[in-house]
Each structure stands twice: as structure tokens, then as C-alpha cells.
Image (cartoon, helix red, strand yellow):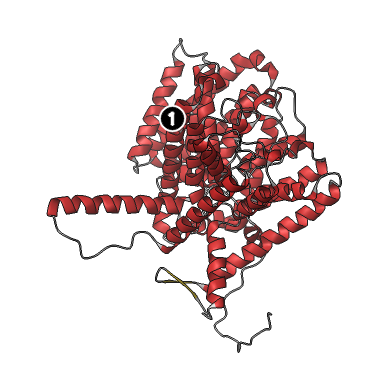
């Protein structure tokens, strides 16, 4: 009898999983077309069917299995309670509640599929690339639905917008404020969040959460995907990433809600939605704004607290999750030491090594770039775009001009009015980008730091790089210079093609556009919407390559060579 129940539960689990996908697809189609009001009754019936199948599947799982997890039990109790709630006559026809239920149902049942990623035939790099391409295509078709836009959109423009959102770039060919409806803006918002963290982060964590564990093969696979050596901490790290992201975005939305002028939104919901949208966009370094002029909007251009919150969100998102976790560890350690000193009144003879070398390099490099970028922007634009601002405002806008090129794409000044030196500095900052394992793009701050340290080590006759009582491995140095060369090669080739395609446009502006796309920045000298279709395709490819990285693409398609246990005799090659 128990075996029959288990087989029945296993079969119903799979059926319920497919049903959740089907109901979610119908939900998108229902909202995406103007005729959805004609099928409201059918949609509600479909929700009821999905609810019954899902609830039955959940109950059978508990009957057939003795392995229960407290958090899963809590989620399922809330899920079943919500089901009973919307089944009441008062809320049975409520469209919003039924839509929320479908989303919860899909999240719960998406974990019912057992996938061994090593049997898919794809290596981690290939899976990473495929996941981004898949989300871009889904986003493209969702944005093409009639209810997503106010005046319709072509396939190429929809793909450009979807790519820009998933790759957290911010370049746009359609005005986000007036070209998209609330549904279209929400789709862009979801694409930004998924693109910033990666679809594999969400999929793998929810699968791990609802199954209560993961196979060894999947742990190894996601360990390679996330560059985590400790297999036991793979999914724990994913949980910390999600919690940290949602916490910072929620706190940022609260601050933006408080500082944003009420004139930017006509009611409470729009004001709250705008705050959430800009917080998510800023933390994920996306650069999308609900204002046609971005932060150069008349209501925001002199709102310096609002701009500073945006800058802080960009910096936190661009630091990278390992750095933020390391900083939290340092904070907790110092707090613990302070408490012990107060209680014991004794000096501690040993100081733990909390802040690792990676964090030190990235924090110092980020600080130097922010400082130099701010000062140089202030000097070159003092009588330019900063002329209309007061003393404090000049420094805030200069700071914004230093922060946003680091792959964010927000601008509180007129891009076409920038001086030539400022444009060149901005291109350099865009190329560098954010830090590794962050939501930003570019070659990364650590790559630049490694390159500079290698220059000085070579000039001083050292055969290795040493920093903070640590030696940088040769593999790290090799990867850094590979990334630099591949990025310049890709951007150079794309710029050459753009110049051929757009002979009437200044070459510097096209080069600026290429750097912005590759580094997933999103800044533009008011050029993107006027580009030809061929140029838009080049930018789409640049955004995608820049997000997944050129080195990842090479790793995806080149077989890994086993390390040999012998070495040939070394020989010097003339360099200069």
C-alpha cells in the first residue's frame, strides 16, 4: 500500500510540475493580450484546477515521505491556507489573488523535476550561457505582447530591450517611461533581477530548498558554476546572496521612497513602485529608469539625497557578493572583539585574518577609482555640466559621474554636453567596470589591479606578485591578461564594424557606445535609438558577450586540457 502511494505521489508530482508551468504560461498570455477580460471565468477555473492538483500533490508527499523539513512545512501550510482563502466565495473571482497563487504554485512545484546537470551534456560555462540566452528569448516574447507596450514594438527592439535588461546594461531603444505599460515595466524589472543574480541562482536555490538537499553531482556542478570550492557551502552561499540582495534592495527602496519628490508619482502605489524599480535597477547596475531623461529629470536633477542613495546601491551591487560577505564577517568580528574588550578589559594578543587579500585588492582599487573619477569629473566639468549646481551639488554630481560608468548607466547630467576629456575618462571607467561576482560588467577591478601590480613587479625585476603577505598565483595573472586582451579585441572589432555601418556618426560616439554595451554600462550620447538595425544587432551581441564574459565563452567551447606531469626546458622570448 505504501509503495502504491509513493508511486502515485511521484507521478502526481511530475504532473503537478507540468501543470504549474502550463498555468504560469496561460497567466502570461492572459495578461498579455487585450481580450483577457473575455476569458476571466476560464482563467479562474484553471486556477482552481491547478490549486486542487497542487494541494493534492503536497498532501501525498507528506503521506509517502518521512523526511520533512520545517521551512518546507511552513511554506506548504501557508500555501494551503492561501488556497482555502481564495476558495471562499468572497475572493473566488479576485484576479490579483489568483495570479499570486499561480506564482506561489509555480515556485513550489518547479522543484519537482529531478535534473542531474552532469547528464545534460553541458559543462558549467555552456549552461551559464544557455540560461542567459533562454531568459533573453522569453523576455523578448513577453515584451512583444500587446499589453506590454503602449504602441507596439518590433522583434529586434524587444530583443534589444530584453538583452539590455537581462545583461543589466540599461541601453534602450524604446522610452521606458512612455513606451511600456505597467506590465511591460514589470517584465523589465523581473528580467533585471534575474539577470543580475543569474537564473541558475534562483532555480538551483529553490530546487535545493524544496527538496531539502541536492545530489553530490549537482553540488559539484554548481560549485564549478559559482567558483566555490567548499561543496557543503554551495547552496548556503546562494541563500546568503538572495537574502543579502533582497535586504539591500528593500532598504534602498525605503530610502528612495522617502527622498523621491511626490510630484514624480500621482499616487502612493506609483510612488512605491518607482522606488522599488529604481532600487532594483541601481543595485543590479542596470541603469533603467522610469523617467525619460533618467536622473536628469527636472524633479531629480537637484535631488542630491536621491542621487546619493542610487550611488550607494550601485557601489554595493558592484562590489560583489564575496566582498560584501567578507565585510559582514569583519563587522561581526570587530563587534565581538569590542564586546569582549568591554567585558574582560583585556588586550587581545592575536588578531584574526578576516579581510582576505581578494577583498583588500578590490576595496582599495574601487576606492581609488571612485576618488580619481570624482576629482577628474569635477575638474573637467566645473564650468560644464556642473555649472548650474551649488558647491555641494557639484561634488554629488561629480561623484555620480564617477560611480555610474562603473557599469550602472544612470546619469544626472546631459551626456551630449560632456567635455572630450570627460568622455575619455568615462570610457576608461566603463572598460574597468565593477568587481568579480557582482551584478556589474567590465574587465573588473581586480583585473586592473593585477595588471598594475604585474607592471611594477616586472619593472622591479621580481618574478612574482606579492601583496599583503600573499603571493598572487600565475594562473590569476594569466587570466587577468587574457581578459584584458579579449575585451580590447572584442570592443575593437565591434567598433570597427559600427563605424562601417554608421558612416554619418562620429567614430568617438560609436566607440563610446561599444564600450558601454560590452561593459554592460548603459550610458549613451543620445545615440542608441537612432542606430540602424545592423548596429543594434552588434550592440545586442556585445551586451551578451560582455555579460557572460569572453573567457567564459571560450571555456564553453574549448575542451579543457589535462595538466601534464612534465615540463619542457624554459626559454626566453624577446619582447622589447
Q: Residue at x 42, y 20 (%)?
A: 84
Image coordinates for residue 248, horizontal then vertical, percent: 43, 39
Question: Which x, y percent locates residue 303?
Answer: 52, 30
**Quarter of the image where the C terminus is located:** bottom right
| Rendering quarter of residue 239 | top left
Residue 88 visible: yes
Position of the N terminus, as image quadrant, is top left
What residue is at 39 percent from the left and 39 percent from the top? 64
Residue nearer the viewer, 401 or 449 = 401
Q: Is residue 476 left or right of residue 142?
A: left
Residue drawn at (62%, 53%) of the image = 548
| Camera-side residue of 330 and 213 | 330
Kindly give the residue lying farthest to the top in the view shown: 90
Q: Secondary structure at mark 1?
A: helix
Q: Is residue 122 visible?
A: no
Q: Position of residue 151 (x, y in %)?
A: 74, 23
**Eyeballing the image, is 362 above or below 68?**
below
Q: Is residue 547 left or right of residue 354?
A: right
Q: Residues within 10 Å of mark 1 (few under 14, many from 20)?
A: some
In the image, taking residue 161 as reference, residue 7 lies left or right, namely: left
- Position in image of residue 543 (x %, y %): 68, 48
Vertical relation: 538 (above or below) 529: below
Nearest the eye: 547 or 242: 547
Q: Residue tagged by mark 1?
A: 254
Amino acid at each position: 500500500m505504501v509503495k502504491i502511494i509513493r508511486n502515485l505521489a511521484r507521478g502526481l508530482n511530475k504532473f503537478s510540475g507540468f501543470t504549474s508551468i502550463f498555468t504560469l504560461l496561460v497567466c502570461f498570455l492572459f495578461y498579455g493580450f487585450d481580450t483577457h477580460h473575455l476569458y476571466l471565468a476560464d482563467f479562474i477555473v484553471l486556477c482552481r484546477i491547478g490549486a486542487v492538483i497542487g494541494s493534492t500533490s503536497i498532501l501525498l508527499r507528506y503521506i509517502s515521505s518521512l523526511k520533512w523539513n520545517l521551512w518546507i512545512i511552513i511554506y506548504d501550510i501557508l500555501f494551503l491556507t492561501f488556497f482555502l482563502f481564495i476558495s471562499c466565495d468572497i475572493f473566488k473571482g479576485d484576479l490579483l489573488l489568483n495570479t499570486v497563487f499561480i506564482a506561489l504554485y509555480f515556485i513550489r512545484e518547479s522543484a519537482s523535476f529531478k535534473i542531474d546537470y552532469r547528464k545534460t551534456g553541458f559543462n558549467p560555462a555552456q549552461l551559464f550561457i544557455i540560461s542567459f540566452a533562454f531568459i533573453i528569448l522569453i523576455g523578448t516574447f513577453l515584451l512583444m505582447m500587446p499589453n506590454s507596450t503602449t504602441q507596439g514594438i518590433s522583434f529586434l527592439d524587444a530583443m534589444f530591450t530584453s538583452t539590455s535588461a537581462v545583461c543589466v546594461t540599461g541601453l534602450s531603444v524604446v522610452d521606458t517611461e512612455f513606451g511600456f505599460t505597467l506590465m511591460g515595466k514589470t517584465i523589465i524589472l523581473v528580467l533585471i533581477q534575474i539577470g543580475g543574480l543569474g537564473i541558475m541562482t534562483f532555480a538551483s536555490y529553490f530546487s535545493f530548498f524544496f527538496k531539502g538537499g541536492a545530489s553530490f553531482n549537482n553540488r559539484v556542478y554548481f560549485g564549478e558554476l559559482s567558483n566555490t570550492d567548499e561543496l557543503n557551502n554551495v547552496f548556503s552561499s546562494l541563500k546568503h546572496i538572495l537574502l543579502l540582495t533582497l535586504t539591500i534592495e528593500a532598504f534602498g527602496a525605503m530610502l528612495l521612497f522617502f527622498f523621491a519628490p511626490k510630484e514624480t508619482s500621482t499616487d502612493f502605489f506609483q510612488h512605491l513602485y518607482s522606488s522599488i524599480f529604481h532600487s532594483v535597477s541601481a543595485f543590479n547596475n542596470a541603469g533603467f529608469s522610469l523617467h525619460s531623461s533618467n536622473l536628469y529629470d527636472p524633479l531629480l536633477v537637484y535631488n542630491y539625497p536621491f542621487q546619493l542613495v542610487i550611488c550607494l546601491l550601485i557601489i554595493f551591487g558592484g562590489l560583489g557578493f564575496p566582498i560584501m560577505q567578507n565585510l559582514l564577517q569583519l563587522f561581526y568580528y570587530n563587534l565581538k572583539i569590542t564586546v569582549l574588550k568591554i567585558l574582560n578589559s583585556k588586550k587581545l594578543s592575536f588578531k584574526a585574518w578576516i579581510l582576505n587579500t581578494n577583498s583588500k585588492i578590490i576595496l582599495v582599487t574601487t576606492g581609488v577609482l571612485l576618488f580619481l573619477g570624482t576629482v577628474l569629473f569635477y575638474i573637467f566639468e566645473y564650468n560644464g555640466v556642473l555649472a548650474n549646481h551649488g558647491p555641494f551639488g557639484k561634488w554629488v554630481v561629480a561623484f555620480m559621474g564617477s560611480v555610474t560608468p562603473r557599469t550602472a548607466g544612470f546619469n544626472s547630467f546631459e551626456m551630449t554636453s560632456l567635455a572630450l576629456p570627460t568622455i575619455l575618462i568615462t570610457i576608461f571607467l566603463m572598460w574597468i567596470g565593477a568587481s568579480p561576482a557582482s551584478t556589474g560588467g567590465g574587465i573588473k577591478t581586480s583585473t586592473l589591479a593585477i595588471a598594475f601590480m604585474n607592471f611594477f613587479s616586472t619593472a622591479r625585476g621580481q618574478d612574482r606578485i606579492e601583496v599583503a603577505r600573499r603571493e598572487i598565483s600565475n594562473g590569476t595573472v594569466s587570466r587577468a591578461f587574457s581578459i584584458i586582451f579579449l575585451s580590447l579585441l572584442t570592443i575593437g572589432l565591434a567598433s570597427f564594424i559600427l563605424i562601417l555601418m554608421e558612416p554619418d556618426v562620429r567614430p568617438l560616439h560609436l566607440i563610446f557606445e561599444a564600450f558601454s554595451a560590452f561593459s554592460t554600462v548603459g550610458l549613451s550620447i543620445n545615440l542608441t535609438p537612432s542606430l540602424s538595425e545592423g548596429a543594434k544587432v552588434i550592440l545586442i551581441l556585445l551586451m551578451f558577450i560582455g555579460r557572460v564574459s569572453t573567457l567564459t565563452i571560450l571555456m564553453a567551447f574549448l575542451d579543457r586540457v589535462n595538466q601534464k606531469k612534465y615540463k619542457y626546458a624554459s626559454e626566453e622570448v624577446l619582447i622589447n
